[in-house]
Image (cartoon, rainbow, N blue to C red):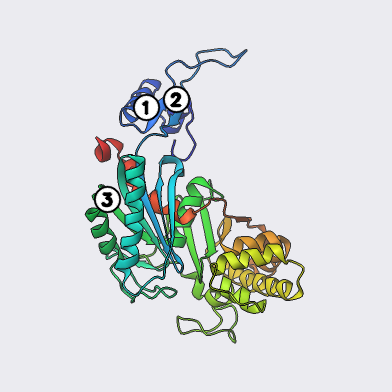
Amino acid sequence: MHTGRAATRALLTAELGVTRATAGAVAAELEALGLIRVDSRPAAPAGSQGRPSHRLSLDETGPVVLAAQIHADGFRAALVGLGGRIVATAPGCVTVAADPAQVIGAVVDAGAGLLRDSRRRCVGAGLAVPSAIAEPEGTALNPLHIAWPAGAPVRAIFAARVRAAGIDGPVFTGNDVNLAALAEHRHGAGRDARQLLCVATGHRGVGGALVLDGRLHTGSSGLALEVGHLTVDPDGRPCHCGGRGCLDVETDPLAFLTEAGREPGPEVSLLQRSRELLRAEPADPAVLAARERLIDRLGLGLAGLVNILNPDRIILGGLHRELLAADPERLRAVVADRGLWGRGGGVPILACTLDHNSLVGAAELAWQPVLDDPLGALA
């Protein structure tokens, strides 16, 4: 039901592979927990035969989780229900200080305010950050585009702030692009893909994620798919990682604005400024040239990833989604030209479809214990 595959009790029976009586008992338990609603008097469509199936829906007044995201320009807090539905949200634009506790405290306070206003039960909390998160420690190893020190214990800080705010339930943290990929796989452009590759820009930098058979591939310690540090121009810009010409600095919003000869300006985020420029001045020669250069670099990076990972779908987010929309044929042609065995051109390249997908992904982490064992988590 969370991923939209069981809208009736008959579909639930088929998905679970159980008897109708067992599916009915499961639905009743979930309804008693306040997670779903069961249509007690189903009506058969006109002209149909047989007994109509009870319709099932997620309870829109049911529990929520607190989802939080921190990026280079501030934060966003949200309450997210089952089905990836954002119930309420609160953005905050702040300077992200070197002490992660400051912005983490601010985003938790914003989320706590949303909870007070909603009077909803909260069953967990998840945080998305623009850094690789080392497991099992929950430390931010490379927050390159925010001022935090490497190795900041973000999960411990987040958990302490959540508890201090009186919020119950398990607490999780994850890399923002990993979580965006997870959300898109369950609710967006990546649904039904078996090997899903996600590449996206944030407000700064580039991240990547791989979902294999429904699960994030995070490597042995949470650090897999740091695609931002794939070299696409050996003579390119210096990168924060110590290399040169990485995707991180050659295809992010700052790179686009620089190539187009535009000053970023302090009034809006780099990502927003880039989007506005692409949409408002697509025929400007400098904008057009910058767009083509970034598409070619992105295509080189994607082709290398296709050759290594052999995904069955690629989804693009942030500025990369805008570049795909601006010239999809050019991007697909670069990937196809560099792909081995002529297979690169056959990989679908799609745009991410969810608003605030990293937030929704953070919520997915917090919802997972409930999805695994509803009675154990909520009874």
Q: Distance between the residues labelled 1 and 3?
A: 24 Å
Which callout, 3 or 2, points at the residue further toward the start of the chain?
A: 2
- What is the three-letter code of the residue carrying label 3? Pro
Residue 178 vs 85, above or below: the answer is below
Image location of residue 168, percent across then percent down: 25, 47
Image location of residue 285, percent across then percent down: 76, 74
Which callout, 1 or 2, points at the residue further toward the start of the chain?
A: 2
Q: For the C terminus, give its image quadrant.
A: top left
Tag 3 residue: 170
Tag 2 residue: 9
Report if the CB atoms under discs 1 and 2 are less than 8 Å apart: yes
- The image quadrant that residue 95 belongs to is bottom left
- For this rendering, which residue is in front, 83 or 269? 269
- For this rendering, which residue is in front, 96 or 239? 96
Residue shown at 60%/55% (left/top)?
351
Image location of residue 50, percent across then percent down: 53, 12
Nearer the viewer's eye, disc 1 or disc 3?
3
The secondary structure type at the circle numbered 1 is helix
- What is the three-letter code of the residue carrying label 2? Arg
Report if the CB atoms under discs 3 and 2 are less than 8 Å apart: no
The secondary structure type at the circle numbered 3 is loop
Tag 1 residue: 27
Describe residue 209's horizontal placement relative to residue 136 as left or right: right
Image location of residue 25, percent across then percent down: 33, 24
Residue shown at 37%/60% (left/top)?
174
- The image quadrant that residue 377 belongs to is top left
Nearer the viewer's eye, disc 3 or disc 2?
3
Q: Distance between the residues labelled 1 and 2?
A: 8 Å
